[in-house]
Amino acid sequence: MQRNFEGASSREPLCKKRKLESTNRTIVHSLCQEFVMHRVCTFLRAHEHALLQAVNHDLARAAQDVTAWEVADFVDNLMRPLVTDAAVLPLLPQWEKLRHLDLACCSNVTDKSLSLVGPHCPQLQYLDVSYCLHLTDRSLSPVAQHCPQLQVLCATACKNITDESIMLVAQHCPQLQCLDVTRCKGVTDQSIMLVAQHCPQLQSLDVCGCNQITDQSIMLVAQHCPQLQSLYVSNCNQITDQSLDRVAQNCLQLLELQVKRTKVTDRSLSLVVQHCLQLQYLDVTQCEGVTEQFLSLLPRQCPQLQHLEAP
């Protein structure tokens, strides 16, 4: 059952909303169009570039040096299946200034090209490789080792990602603010505890479906990451009131909490509502320990709540 309160807006996790602040010098390329045009324009001779500039400024812009690119988004759903290792590899040596790379749903991209993103993009701050199903630790480990400014890492459904690479991210990327490893079943308490200890600026954590995650790591996140605003632990069936108590006590800036299909109860959720006065989104679907009595009191106890998903 979905209950929308006044002023509600559609939910989107902070990891997915996070974008780098734009500046006047930032050149944003939607690679669904610009990538193809650039590849075509590289075959033109000098006088042909001049003619193109006179005829069509948009096409001419695509012919510019790709070393100026700071943002690369493969945003077009029709284009994504065409993005392959062969398409990405020629661009990597020229992407030294790249800060934002979105390859989400580019399922034909593999370790062959992604393992080189880290060495070639040392200024990278945002990386989304969600649903890149062939991706392994061989790709993320170099990103961790070569991209110390990384702030956002989204790897939803990358089933071959494990603690090995996430531990390196924790150790080498202290500015990390958003981590999404939804359904990465090889991610356990071991790496999330390291993230908690080394990434105090963490604001958003999504470990939904990582069924090896327990109270142990979430308690440590709550202890070391007081700026946490978004916590998603749905389908982590070892999560109980013990970790949520710590979240309520330490994460006073919490905006979004999803604990669907966990073992939390009214007791810890009451603490969250009492202490996290900015809470706007709450999902307690299929939580057997959550009662209708608690839910009925929420509008009064948590007036700022905009969106509730409950049994």
Image (spheres, rainbow, N blue to C red):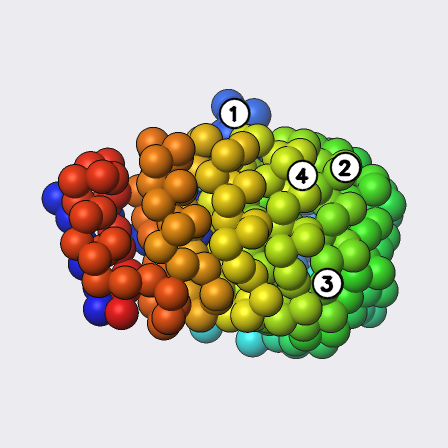
The answer to whether the residue labelled 2 contacts the one labelled 4, judged by CB atoms less than 8 Å apart, is no
Q: Residues within 10 Å of mark 3 (few under 14, many from 20)?
A: some
Secondary element under disc 4, as helix, strand or loop, is loop
x, y percent for residue 310: 28, 64
Q: Residues within 10 Å of mark 4 (few under 14, many from 20)?
A: many
Residue for badge 3:
188
Q: Residues within 10 Å of mark 1 (few under 14, many from 20)?
A: few
Residue at the spot 64% in from the left edge and 36% down from the top edge:
223
**Can residue 159 be seen in the rendering of this structure?**
yes
Q: Amino acid at mark 1?
A: Thr
Q: Nearer the viewer, mark 1 or mark 3?
A: 3
Residue for badge 4:
176
Q: Amino acid at mark 4?
A: Leu
Q: Nearer the viewer, mark 3 or mark 4?
A: 3
Between 204 and 221, the one nearer to me in the picture: 221
Residue 198 circle label: 2
- Give the farthest residue toward the left: 6
x, y percent for residue 67: 72, 39
Residue at the spot 77% in from the left edge and 54% down from the top edge:
191
x, y percent for residue 166: 76, 55
Label 1, label 2: how many angstroms apart (C-alpha)? 29 Å
Residue for badge 1:
23
**Image height of 94 relative to 77, above or below:** above
